[in-house]
Image: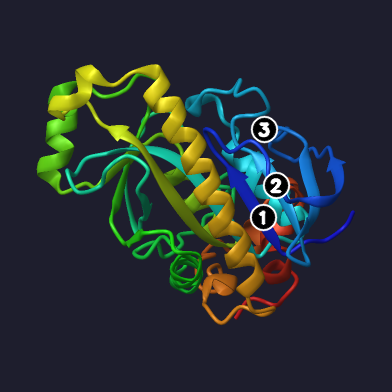
Amino acid sequence: MEQVKVGIIGGSGLYDMSELTGRTEITLDTPFGPPSDRFVVGTLRGRRVAFLARHGRGHRILPGELNFRANIYAMKMMGVERILSASAVGSLREELAPQQVVLPDQFVDRTFNRVSTFFGDGLAAHIAFADPVCPDLLEQVLLASQKVGINVVKGGTYVCIEGPAFSTKAESNLYRKWGMDVIGMTNLQEAKLAREAEICYVTMALVTDYDCWHDSHESVTVDMIVGNLIQNSRNAQTLILQTIEDLADRRACRCGEALKDALITDRKAIPPGTVARLQHIVGKYLSQPQA
């Protein structure tokens, strides 16, 4: 299998990268089942990357149905070290208008029915997640935005809800009182699993509309949302292309050693089946003697 170091996860409206050349489609299976779709491996700005449509081609998978573990594990199998994620979100702040790009650096989890860890089944691990987004990769996207002239807001909190229904007005106003900035249904699980897999992760939160708290909510039409999705997709592709062009070959952050002090189970007590299943995640640690 070809090894690539950069993965791209496209959300609502971003189902392909138009400039991707030398394409090869790869079907992978993982110990956690199949990913959302086939990976498209190709070249962007001279760098080999792997693209995955988060909701599958044709947008057929609900947020709560996504196999997040399979998506991230498959990226790890391919050698991915950095993930650039794009996601449609609603705005919880007046100043974050539709078509604005936000780079959240915090998450709040309001999901209830999702698995967001690779661990368990006889292996306990507790990653540090105080800063859930790779600061270096976030800075790279910010610098890219300045080069291409796309206005990006650095920082903010993404509240991740279960869905698939949108919020009630009471919920939306509650999140605003909590100080949340944008609202979506997918990125929290990706960020957690990427950290466990020691992959750098950043999300480009692409505002499609104000959430239902806003006075203009009733006047929002499907055509308006589609128009915002199209423009957001263009902005995301432009940002991704410039970021990839500027990426250093080697990482300077600590994401690549997130599990160094996180595994607490006695090595002799870990079931062999769990070791085999998580080989791509913990293999380098379990092959070393325990201190």
- In this rendering, which labeled residue sits more in front, label 2 or label 3? 2
> Which residue is the site of mark 2?
51
Amino acid type shown at disc 1:
Gly
Up/down of 199 relative to 25, above or below: below
Q: Any mark on residue 7, and which?
A: 1
| Mark 2 surroundings: few (<14), some (14-19) or many (≥20) residues within 10 A | many
Q: Any mark on residue 141, and which?
A: none
Image quadrant in which you'd find residue 68: top right
Residue 163 visible here: no
Lateral position of residue 165 relative to residue 286, left or right: left
Amino acid type shown at disc 2:
Phe
| Marks 2 and 3, the one that precedes in the sequence | 3
Cβ–Cβ under 8 Å for marks 2 and 1: yes
> Which residue is the site of mark 3?
36
Q: CA distance from mark 1 to mark 3?
A: 14 Å
| Marks 1 and 3, the one that precedes in the sequence | 1
